[in-house]
Each structure stands twice: as structure tokens, then as C-alpha cells.
Image (cartoon, coloured by chain):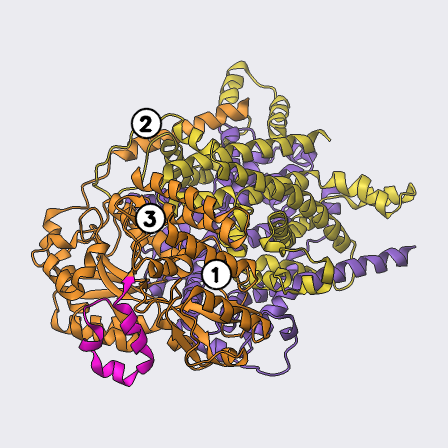
Chain colours: A orange, B yellow, C purple
Amino acid sequence: MRFIRSAALVAAVALGTVACSGGSDGAGGGDAAAHDATGPITVWLSNNEQEVGWGQDVVDAWNADHPDEQVTAQEIPAGASSEEAITAAITAGTAPCLVYNISSAAVPGWVRQGGLVDLASFPDGADYLADRGGDGVDVYQTDGGSYQLPWKSNPVMVMYNKALFAQAGLDPDDPGMETYDAFLDGARAIVDSGAAPSAIWPSPTNDFYQPWFDFYPLYLAETDGTLLVEDGKATFDDEAGHAVADFWATVYSEGLAPKEESTDDAMATGQTAMQLAGPWAIASYGDTIDVGFMPVPTSDGRADVTTFADSKNVSMFTACENQGTAWEFLKFSTNEENDGGLLEATGQMPLRQDLAGTYPDYFAANPAYEVFADQAGRTGDVPSIPNSIEAWQAFREAYSSAVIFGGTSVDDFLSTAADKVDALVGG
Amino acid sequence: MTAVTTGARTGRTHPSAPAGRTRRRWWGGQPIGTLFAAPYLVFVLAIFAYPLGFAAYISVHDYFFTAPGVEVDKPFVGLDNFVTVLTDPQVLASFRNTAVFLVINVPLTVVLALVLASALNAGVRWASVYRVAYYVPYLTASVSLVGVWMLLFSSGGLVNAVLGPLAPDPSWLINKGLAMPTIALYVTWKQLGFYVLLYLAALQNVPRELYESAETDGANGFQRFLNVTVPGVRSATTLALILAIITGTNLFTEPYLLTNGGGPDGASTTPVLLIYQRGIQQQNPDTAAAIGMLLVIVVGLLSLAANRLNREK
Amino acid sequence: MRRWSGALRHVLLGLMALVFAFPFFFMLVGAFQENPTNTPDRLLPTSGWTTENFTRIDSRIDLAGSLLNSLVFTGGVLLGTVVCGTLAGYAVARLDFLGRRLTWVLMLLVQMVPFQLLMIPLYVQITRGYGLGDTYLGMILPFAINTTAVFIFTQFFRALPREMFEAARIDGAGELRILRSIALPLVRPALATVVLVTFIGPWNEFLWPFLITKDATMQPLAVSLANYISNVAQSTANPNGAILAGAAALAFPVVVLFCLFQRYFTASDLGSAVKG
């Protein structure tokens, strides 16, 4: 009992502390004066070596011309830990002015926190976004506001190991695996011939973003670009969703893909012959294995396949004290010249209109990337919805138990996941 | 607790005037203790009181984190978050998974650590080499150890190669029934060095004469272990039990790394993994805080039980 | 009989030592391989040795600087824990004073709360409340006194024979003197445990120092290496060599320190001290 009394005392003291410090929050974000102010700013870049190199060049060029508006660049790792850091920084009001390499899925949550600046609130904001990105930019709006600048995409295609394909008796230059049936036949040939122990190896884990690299690209392809959620309703409990889920269920039940996370880079060690990947893979694998790329399969093998964009974007934060400078720097870093530099340095596709026409020299010199430039014109992305990450997590868990592990039926998975997503998105 | 009775007794050994007694009852027999404990108390109040109280506050509100200066209504909702959490099958499963973990990990850790520590303490040659070997997994960061564990327990790994036809299908970490026990084994292995060290330190305080007199009474090695060693390190066992329970209930890194995000059908989801997913990834700190509060209560009760059980033995 | 049990003991200890040292072996071998994989047949490689994994780390991060930051971080934590922890542990175990039970309950409570629950409020408090963002103090503060260590001290002071303290008190020794001349020497074996458990926390801690500072010149080794690993894992075809080399670079200083000081982890025979 003494324990309980003491614990109650501790709780009371603690609550007192909260009550005292609760009122001390001064007005911080949404400061009208900050909106047009100029001066030094801080930006965060993804710590990918090529991107840091690009970023440092852009910052140096800017700083040389703007002695009173110096930009400081810091590196943060891509992925989960940086999203935690950003969420914490928004809450404490210590976020930087701009963060490059943001995933769209996290944006609705940060908007709800009041952490992001609507770029359309700058006089030339809406025009700049539309001029650079074209019609596609509307998809990236949240609650009618432009809280992210669509920066670059990594359109997802099927990467394959040409040597293993040849070993399995498939034509390495034109495997002809555009339809589900042809794809499955090809996959069986790879495993049966012993060319590789598995045909394709998507990560089977339960991370909320894994659907972007198995179910979602094929669903976008099958529907010519229908997002997972449209007009506040889940779309996937339909014929197309069934076809895609059945396709992956067949892949797993026939043992064409392992149900376990690879302990290695399965592509590099020849443990698998295919992987869904973006243009970054060319730089990663180009030197070690001969890889080819083909569009993701559809049920009917149509031409002009749509896929998942896997975009990374730029956002401005309300904690920024010199938003005028931040906006000018954002425009500078995403102008035609610096976008070209990004393409050159990283091979990732800037999200701007007519890529192939804007940078003809680059694609002439790097023909391997041309197929991605073409694909970049037909992509869908993560819908901007409330409880975005929670919805993807619910979707993933249902998918995993039905499609990967075969514990529940595909019908059940689609209808229960759709109900859950509807409930999350609606409220 | 033991400490309380000790204090009372020390107080009694110094009889003094009535006025002094009242003062003593208030300040205690050795008021200088307040001074000794003050830095730690100040530290805890300054660092943990606010976040902890805040977590309690969040758990009874419809809450989410906002940027400073953003005014949003965050109404008081009573126990709603707790009801939500307690009716969520995923949360209940995560507590069940933790129970599986504790049942395997805690006894294994305590028994193995005590056996190894007393074997080391008996003065074998190369004791220092052995000691270093035992501490290595504890010293090494999980990122590299997980790679080794995968090498051992993946479908085509060493363990399955040795087991041959006896290998489980599906393999260990993707098997609903085996994912959590495999993680429990991993954590036992990773943490054991620390508990060995704990027991080694405790064994230094077991008077050697007790062993000698037991030996003259004709007790064999096993009997000496049971009748001298085990009672001699009782307070270290309480400590080991409580620490193992706390480590087990706060399990996060291992299921996160080994079975990324909770394993097959959430078979290795733990409460802290859910706190992380809901509170930080999905930005629902209110239900996350409710899970956290429940967890603290459960751990508190378990630690109390461990303390009592070991004292009354 | 005697020899048998001795042999048995050696077999047990040796077997367990193999099981425990195996990952370190794996890590070391992999760190010096051109292309390490997780397949069993690569455990005893005969070719493909290289130091390139380490030179690449060295070219990308400032090893000496991060090591220094790590030492500042862990050193601060160790100092705070050992000084304040012995005092608090001794007081709770052996003294009767106002707030004793409260301290004990707090000690249990603080350990039971998962860090993931407190992370964001703690960050807000340290950066906004105390204005300690981007400072070493802000990095150290949440770890400054390791509660598990205080808990271990308490439990060890409790295990010491009560009679010794009472005898000293009857002899008229002050509490400070009892602490200095009786309690501290006897608790030395626990000190080694405490140093180890305290050291390992901040040394391997990634999330907190990363949250508190984005300034690369202030980041400890664990943060630099984790960032390096996440970066390499994304952008090279076979990241295993880099990951293992990074882990080895992080573990190496600890193992060296541990081997150097390992004789302090064996306590001298205290039986006579207790008797006297």
C-alpha cells in the first residue's frame, strides 16, 4: 500500500509540473512576420553521398551570391529515424526551414501538427509549382494546400538479372513477361531451371511502406493510376485489387518468392533474379551484374503501363524564421539548372514536365536511364489522406497475413482492409 | 520492503529525548540521507517528472503533438483511450507475446548466469578469457549481432542445415509459434554477460567460510551450490529478476530488427513496438500513452511480485 | 571426483565461450572481406581480404572527432552516475531519512517507462524548456544518472552485512566516514558492473544524440556510424562489409577498454574484510 501511496504522490508532483509548464508556450509558428523575412536559414539534406554532394554545390552557389542570406546544410539519414526527428522538431519548434527528401505519406500528419507552410501562400507559389511540375502536382496537395514541392521520383520497374534469365531459357533482351500469366511462367522457369532459388524477392516485412514495392505499383498499373484511396474511400476492393492480390498470392504459394526477409542483398548474391526497383538501382548494380528493366506486369499486358512514383519532396516548416529566403532558395535549388545537376549526380528523376525534352544531352549519354524518363511520365503516388501511415500499416498487416502467409483468404483481406482504411480515412 | 524494516531498527538503537524523537520521525534517523539522495531526486524530477506526467496526461485526453503556438482542442476523454486499447486484439496479442518472452527469457537468464558465474568464480584457468567472451555480445551493438542471428536462424541458415528434416517449416523467425521464443533466446544470449558479471560481483560477498564449513559437513559441489551459493546471492537474484523483467517488457529493438515490424501476423509484436508505431510513426500519442501506462502498471506488479517471492523463499 | 568436476566445468565454460564469441568472430572476419555474405560456407574465407571497408568509413566520417564526442558523452554520464549513484544507492539501502521510499519508488518507476513513450516530450523539454539543443549537456542530461546503476548500487549495499554499519555507528563514525571507509571499498565489485552497464548505454545510443544535434561535428561515433551504415545500405550493391566494419569500429574501443581494465572486474577476496 505504501508503494501505491508513494506512486500516487509521484504522479501528483509530475502532473503539477505539467500544469505549470503547460502555459508557457509562447506564440511560435504561423508568425506573420516570418513569412516574408529574409536572413540565414538551415536546410536538411538526405545523407546519400551523391545527394549531399549536389546539395553542397547548390548551397555554395547560393551563398556566393547572397552574403546576408547564408544557407547551412545538415545531413539526416533517409527513412524512419529522420521522420521521428522531424516530428519531434516540429513539436519543439526547432525544425529547419527546408527538408529535402520527404516522403508524401508523412506529410498529412505534419500538416495536422501545424508544422508545414502552405507554399501557395507565397504570391508566386501556385504558379511556380504548376510551371515546374505540370498538372500532376495537384495529387500532392493536402486539404487543398500545397505543403510539399514534388521534387524527384524513382518510378518503380521490374529489374532483372540478364545472366540468370538466359540460364533459365528466357530472352534477356525481351523476356516478354508483360502479362501475369507470362510473368508467372517466366518465374517458374527461373526456379525450375535452378537458375536462382527464387524468382523475385520483395521484402515480406510488415513495415507500413512495403506495399509501395509489391502490391501498389501493380495496382496502379492494373487501374491506369487509381490511388489506394480516392474521394475518401478505399478503391482496392474491386476486380483490379483482386487480380493483383491473386497474382502475388500465387507467387508466394508456389514458392517463387521467399516469405522471409533476405539476410543479404539477394539480387547481388544471385539468390533471386528480379526485384522491383527505381533508377537508383542502375548505379548500385550496374557495375556488378548485367541488369535489364521492364515495366511491372498487368493482367492483359497493356502498353504504357503506369507505376508507383516513389517520390521524395521538399517541405518548408513553420518554425522557419526567414521564410522569404527559404522560398527563394527552394526555387533556386529546383530550377532547371539545379534539377539537371540532381539528375546528373544521382540518376533520380526531377518531377518536372517533359524530362526527356529538357535534358536531351543527359539521356543521350546515359541510355540506361531513358526507360525511366519515359516511365516517369506515367506514375501514381501515395494519396494525401488523414491517418495516412496508420492506413498503410493496416493495409500491410492484412495483406501480409492473407497474401504472403496465406492465413486468410484474399476476399477477406480486401474487404476487411477496405473497411479499416475507410474508417481511418473518414474519421 | 527490506529497507523499511532496516531503517526502523537503526532508529531504535539510538534512544533519545522525546523532542528529538519527533524530529527524527519526520527527518528519519539519518537525515543526511536526504542530502545523499538529493542529486538523484533532483535529476529525476527535472528530467523525468515532466515527460512522465505528460504521458499520463496524454493518456486521458484526445491528444496529438502540435507545433508551438498552434491552438487545437484536445478534450479530456477519461478512460476512452484505455478502453480502445484494451479492446484492440493487436494490443492484447502484444501483451501475450511479452508473456511468452518472459516465461522463456527470465528463468533461462537467471539460472544460466548464476551457473556460469559460480563456475567462473571457482577459480578456473583462463577465467579472464572466458569472461571477455561472455561479455562480447553484451558489448556489441545489435545491428551486427542481428546479422549473425539471421545467419543462424533463417530458412537456409546454419541451424536448419544442422537439423535437416527436423527443421521447422515455416522457418523460425517467420513461424507464428516460434518467432517470439527465437527472439527470447536471442535476448538471453545477448544480455547474459551482464548478468554473469552481476552474479560474479555478488559472489564476492559470500563469505568463503560458509563453503569451507559446508565442505567439512560433507556437502558435494551441487549441494554447496544449492545451500550456500543460491541463498548467498539472493539480493542479486532479486535484482536480476527485476532487471530481466523490465528489459523483457520494454523489448523493442530486437523484434524491430529481427522480424521487422512484428513478424508473421504480429506474432512478435511487443507493446513498445506498438507505442513506437502508434505514438511516433502514426502520430497517435494518446493511445500509445495508454499502452505505456498499462505497461508500467504490469511491470510494476511483476517486479513487486518478484521482489516478494524471492524474499519469502 | 574433483578432477572430473573441474573438467566438466571447463567443457561448460569453453563451450559457452565459443557460442558467445562467435558473433565477434563473424563481425571481424566480415569487416575485412571484400564481399561478405551471410551464407554458412563463407564463415572461414580464404581469400578476398581487404581493409577497404575501413578506409571508406575513414574517408566519409571524422573518426577521431566522433570518438572524442563519444568520450565526452559517455564520460559525462559515467561521472554523474558513479558519483551521484553511490550516494543515492547507499542512502536508500542503509539510511533512514525523509524521502527514502519516494526515491526507491522513483527508481523502479523510471526504469519501467519505455523511452519511446517519453521521447517527444523529453525532447521538447530539453530543447525548449532548458534551451539545450545542440549542446553536450543536452545530450548527456537524460542519461546523466543511470537509474539501473543506482538500483544495482542499492541492491549491493543492501547485501552487505548490517552489523558492520551498526558497529561503526556505535563507534561514533559519521555517515560520510562510514560511506568512505566501509561501504565504498566493499562495493567495488559492483562498481565494475555499474561502469559496464552505464558505459554501454550512451556508447551505443543512436536516437537521442541524433535528435538533439544535427551538427555532424558534435555527433558521437554511434550516430556517425549509424548514418554511414544507413547511407551505404541504400547506395551500394553489397552493404554487408560496410555494416560489419561500422559495427566493428563501434565495438572495438569498448572491447579494448574492457580487456585493458578487465582485472578490475575481478574483485579481490572480501571475505576477510567482512569478517573483520
Q: Which residue is mark 3?
A: A235
Q: Earlier in the sequence, mark 1 or mark 3?
A: 1
- Subunit under mark 2: B
In the picture as drawn, the residue positioned furthest to the left comes out as: A123
Which one is closest to the eye, mark 2 or mark 1? 1
Q: Amino acid at mark 2?
A: Phe
**Disc 3, SS:** loop
Residue visible at 49% across and 33% down in the picture: B294
Quadrant of the rendered structure where residue C162 is?
A: top right
Q: CA distance from mark 2 to mark 1?
A: 41 Å
Residue A190, compared with residue B84, is above or below; it is below
- A86 displayed left or right of C43: left
Reply yes or no: does residue A371 show up in magenta: yes
Where residue A177 sits in the image (x, y, percent)? 43, 71
Badge 3, how many Cα within 10 Å: few under 14, some, many 20+? Answer: some
Residue A120, compared with residue B158, is above or below; it is above
Magenta segment, which residues? A351-379
Q: Amino acid at mark 1?
A: Ser
Where residue A308 sits in the image (x, y, percent)? 33, 62
Q: What label sits on residue B76 in the rendered view?
A: 2
Which one is closest to the eye, mark 1 or mark 3? 3
**Are both tags, 3 and 2, on one chain?**
no
Which is nearer the eye, B24 or A378? A378
